[in-house]
């Protein structure tokens, strides 16, 4: 609330802010929710971090906020679209800006097959699950499961296994962002799975189809010296040093 009060005073007479910008105060989770609720909006979203982790956000500066807003650089990103068929053959759709997570739902490991279009990537993956990540999300959960960091202009998606048991040495795959990825549960009765688009979960999934929705563009604003590209590069350097 303190940041909101300071902002209200600072931008009261700033017409460009009122007309074009949506200022989001919180963490990455709140930014993801806000973007999805405004998926048909052409406005520009400027995030101010007040949460625990703000990779998608900017650091608040009371002194420089108007300068930062007026000189902010825009990056447009497209989300993944997840279509899930559950065990009752019901269809659910969700958007994911960071990643789609397919996770085991019980003590039993998941048994999955993965296709890229009509081509089989892996016939049977026995694991805790698998992630399909966008470049924007490649430094989030994807990085935690040792997936690759993707540059924003790479036009790629990352498919990363979570604790693979068979084949144990499978490291995943990087695919074109125009690919349609299909994940099937090979044993839905004994080995149930859930599919999660960022923070939207569908349980007892049988089939998950994932592709980039290039028709939707989210316009994110970043301070000149803290662009999303720069943040991704910093994470990449950290990983290489470690």
Image (tube, grey):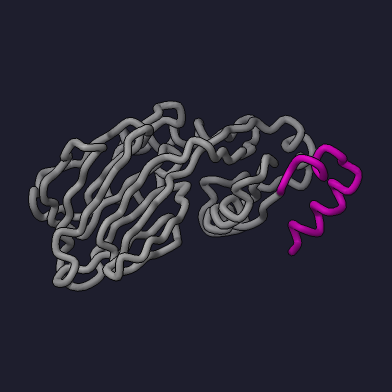
Residue depicted at 45% across the width and 55% down the height: 94
Left or right: where does residue 234 sit relative to residue 35? left
In the figure, 127 relative to 58: above or below? below
Asked if residue 132 can be seen in this view, the reply is yes
Which secondary structure dominates the residues rendered in magenta? helix
Residue 205 is situated, as x and y percent measured from the top left of the image, at 29, 63
In what quadrant of the picture does the N terminus appear? bottom right
Q: Residue furthest top?
A: 153
Left or right: where does residue 90 sit relative to residue 78? left
Residue 5 located within the stretch drawn in magenta:
yes
Asked if residue 143 can be seen in this view, the reply is no
Splitting the image into 4 quarters, where does residue 226 fall?
Answer: top right
Residue 77 is situated, as x and y percent measured from the top left of the image, at 52, 37
Residue depicted at 29% across the width and 43% down the height: 181
From which residue to which does the magenta span run? 1-22
Q: Residue furthest right?
A: 13
Left or right: where does residue 166 sit relative to residue 114? left
Residue 236 is situated, as x and y percent measured from the top left of the image, at 37, 34
Residue depicted at 26% across the width and 45% down the height: 160
Residue 200 is situated, as x and y percent measured from the top left of the image, at 44, 62
Q: Nearer the viewer, residue 98 or 55?
A: 98
Q: Nearer the viewer, residue 21 or 78?
A: 78
Q: Nearer the viewer, residue 157 or 242?
A: 157
Left or right: where does residue 20 sit relative to residue 159? right
Residue depicted at 32% across the width and 39% down the height: 180
Residue 55 located within the stretch drawn in magenta:
no
């Amino acid at each position: 609330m303190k940041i909101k009060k300071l902002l209200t005073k600072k931008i009261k007479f700033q017409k460009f802010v009122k007309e074009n910008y949506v200022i989001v105060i919180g963490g990455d989770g709140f930014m993801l929710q806000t973007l999805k609720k405004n998926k048909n909006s052409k406005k520009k979203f400027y995030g101010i971090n007040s949460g625990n982790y703000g990779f998608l956000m900017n650091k608040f500066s009371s002194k420089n906020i108007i300068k930062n807003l007026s000189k902010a650089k825009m990056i447009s990103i497209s989300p993944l679209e997840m279509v899930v068929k559950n065990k009752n053959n019901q269809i659910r759709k969700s958007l994911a800006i960071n990643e789609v997570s397919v996770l085991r739902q019980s003590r039993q490991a998941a048994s999955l097959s993965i296709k890229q279009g009509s081509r089989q990537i892996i016939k049977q993956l026995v694991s805790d699950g698998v992630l399909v990540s966008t470049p924007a999300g490649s430094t989030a959960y994807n990085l935690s499961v040792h997936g690759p960091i993707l540059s924003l202009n790479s036009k790629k998606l990352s498919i990363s296994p979570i604790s693979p048991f068979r084949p144990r040495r499978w490291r995943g795959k990087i695919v074109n962002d125009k690919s349609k990825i299909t994940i099937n549960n090979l044993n839905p009765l004994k080995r149930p799975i859930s599919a999660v688009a960022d923070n939207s979960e569908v349980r007892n999934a049988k089939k998950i189809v994932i592709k980039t929705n290039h028709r939707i563009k989210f316009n994110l604003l970043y301070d000149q010296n803290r662009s999303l590209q720069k943040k991704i590069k910093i994470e990449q350097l950290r990983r290489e040093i470690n």
